[in-house]
């Protein structure tokens, strides 16, 4: 007969107690995911077999994972991947862990690209539609977008330029692109944002840039200490890097293009003001996430001959979010 301490239910309960004491916001979920990792199954397998015996080897692996989680290491790093937009995205210390909130950016980009590809017949030999993923990190946005476009049989009409300041993050993006079969539709550029001018210009620019205010970093969940600070720190008000990208849009975004910038929950009014100040006549709308919080800035240039647009203050969007980057008071404890 199996020892009580060696069965799934007992191991999960004991680990959940330890993780709760260590400050995890989701101790039981963490324990279930880590045991699944140690045993070589998924969480469903753990839930379906609470009385199953766990052998010595997997139990020792589980104990080591729980001990690391007690020190704050994110579950996504311990497992080596994070589910994002229906995909398993490889994750490690080279890049920020993708958060569910960022799926709103992917869904919006998918709609923008699809609309441009289907608005009118594309002549044979047309150049691919250009998309930029600025600050690509793990490549989650670019990879998820291309996989979704592949399902619509549109991926061969698009190329995504993935740009990041970190060579290590860019290598992780390459690995994710290769593992999901979309590397042939991507380019990888080591650089700081975009060049001042590009040709042909981008139809869609996606960006999940650092947007946590420097003063808020100390108040973030302990898990965030394991993620790259450069991917979080957005300067005194969180918008320093975003402002620099706004300044580059006139020379990089197509006349009928759109820029999609993820923002913090307290930055809706700020991004509207910055767009109005830096991009005269450009339109800026702010979409909200499932919690009703500002999450995505949708920025478009004025149409030819159009009078300067009045940029409205952010209003709640009718579009639901599918699930960002953490800011104090902005998100759950960890994106693991």
Image: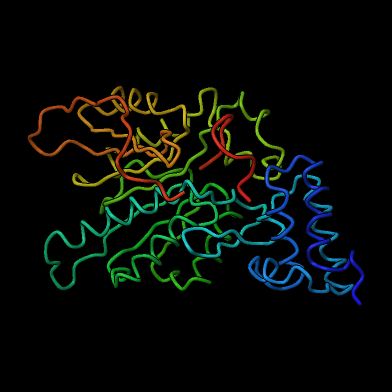
| On screen, residue 15 above or below 325 | below
Colour theme: rainbow
| On screen, residue 56 above or below 12 | below
| Most distant residue in the left direction | 305
- Left or right of residue 1: residue 275: left
Foreground of the two, 122 or 270:
270
Write down the quadrant of residue 247 in the picture.
top left
| On screen, residue 54 above or below 143 | below
**Residue located 64% across and 53% down the image:** 94
Foreground of the two, 54 or 258:
54
x, y percent for residue 121 = 12, 66
Foreground of the two, 132 or 52:
52
Question: How many discs mark residues in the rendered view?
Answer: 0
x, y percent for residue 272 = 33, 27
| Most distant residue in the bottom direction | 1
**Residue located 49% across and 71% down the image:** 180
Image quadrant holding the N terminus, namely: bottom right
| On screen, residue 234 above or below 81 | above
x, y percent for residue 128 = 26, 64
**Residue located 43% across and 70% down the image:** 182
- Left or right of residue 335: residue 294: left
**Residue located 68% across and 42% down the image:** 25
């Amino acid at each position: 007969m199996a020892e009580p301490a060696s069965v799934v239910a007992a191991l999960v309960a004991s680990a959940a107690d330890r993780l709760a004491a260590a400050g995890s916001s989701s101790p039981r979920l963490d324990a279930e995911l880590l045991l699944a990792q140690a045993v070589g199954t998924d969480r469903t397998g753990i839930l379906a077999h609470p009385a199953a015996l766990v052998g010595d080897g997997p139990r020792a692996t589980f104990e080591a994972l729980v001990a690391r989680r007690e020190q704050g290491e994110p579950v996504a790093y311990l497992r080596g991947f994070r589910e994002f937009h229906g995909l398993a995205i490889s994750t490690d210390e080279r890049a920020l862990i993708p958060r569910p909130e960022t799926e709103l950016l992917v869904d919006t980009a998918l709609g923008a690209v699809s609309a441009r590809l289907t608005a009118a017949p594309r002549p044979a030999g047309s150049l691919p539609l250009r998309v930029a993923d600025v600050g690509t990190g793990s490549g989650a946005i670019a990879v998820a977008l291309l996989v979704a476009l592949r399902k619509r049989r549109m991926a061969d009409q698009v190329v995504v330029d993935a740009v990041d300041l970190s060579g290590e993050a860019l290598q992780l993006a390459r690995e994710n692109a290769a593992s999901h079969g979309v590397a042939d539709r991507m380019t990888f550029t080591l650089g700081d944002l975009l060049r001042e001018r590009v040709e042909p210009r981008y139809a869609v620019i996606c960006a999940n840039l650092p947007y946590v205010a420097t003063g808020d970093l100390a108040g973030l969940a302990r898990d965030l200490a394991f993620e790259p600070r450069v991917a979080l720190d957005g300067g005194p008000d969180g918008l320093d890097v975003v402002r620099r990208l706004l300044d580059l849009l006139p020379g990089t975004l197509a006349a009928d293009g759109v820029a999609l910038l993820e923002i913090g929950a307290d930055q809706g009014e700020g991004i509207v003001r910055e767009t109005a100040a830096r991009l005269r006549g450009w339109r800026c709308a702010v979409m909200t996430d499932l919690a009703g919080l500002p999450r995505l800035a949708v920025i478009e240039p004025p149409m030819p001959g159009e009078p300067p647009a009045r940029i409205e203050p952010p209003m709640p969007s009718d579009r639901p979010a599918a699930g960002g980057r953490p800011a104090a008071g902005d998100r759950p404890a960890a994106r693991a």
